[in-house]
Image (tube, rainbow, N blue to C red):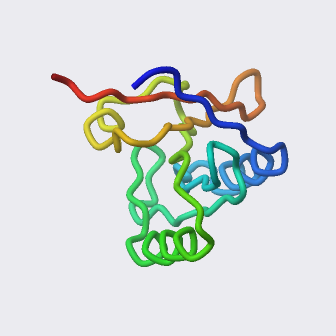
Amino acid sequence: MGVVKISIARKHLEEMRVDVAARYPVEACGLLAGVRGKSLGVFPLRNVLESPHRYLADAEEMARALWEIHRRGWQVLAVYHSHPLGGFRLSAADLRFAERQFIHLIWAKKAGKWSVRGWVVYPVS
């Protein structure tokens, strides 16, 4: 896999930021979808763990979101979640459970404001 690039519309960044801020101090999670690397929609998902340290997306919400993404002819571009109590680095749990085919967007507070960083997790050979 070479350089991975997606284009995220400002309104989609804002939707994700509002989602992670509203769920604080619980980790927020969701999907960013679009076509050919361009964002077209955000799909927030409930964290069934209700934890500030880990997340597990609600299976029914995930199924509905994936169905809607497919129905629209879009693709999942990224998985996002927040680190309400930590930084931007992927945690050991993030790395263990990360889908290798998606970009991972991690939201964390920097200087009191929510910011985002993206990661690609490559398979270990």
Q: Is residue 93 left or right of residue 2?
A: left
Depth check: 107 or 12 in front? 12
Residue 34: percent from left, percent from top: 64, 54
Q: Is residue 17 left or right of residue 74?
A: right
Is 119 placed above or below 31 here?
above
Residue at the limit of the structure toward the right, as seen here: 11
Depth check: 32 or 50 in front? 32
Task: Residue at 50% x, 37% y: name it.
Answer: 103
Q: Is residue 111 left or right of residue 53?
A: right
Is 96 placed above or below 124 here?
below
Residue 116: percent from left, percent from top: 66, 32
Task: Residue at 36% x, 37% y: name it.
Answer: 94
Residue 68: percent from left, percent from top: 57, 75
Depth check: 99 or 85 in front? 99
Residue at the limit of the structure toward the left, as seen here: 125
Marker count (numbered)? 0
| Quarter the C terminus occupies | top left
Task: Residue at 78% x, 31% y: name it.
Answer: 113
Q: Quadrant of residue 48?
A: bottom left
| Quarter the N terminus occupies | top left
Task: Residue at 54% x, 57% y: name it.
Answer: 75
Is 7 placed above or below 39 here?
above
Residue 64: percent from left, percent from top: 50, 78
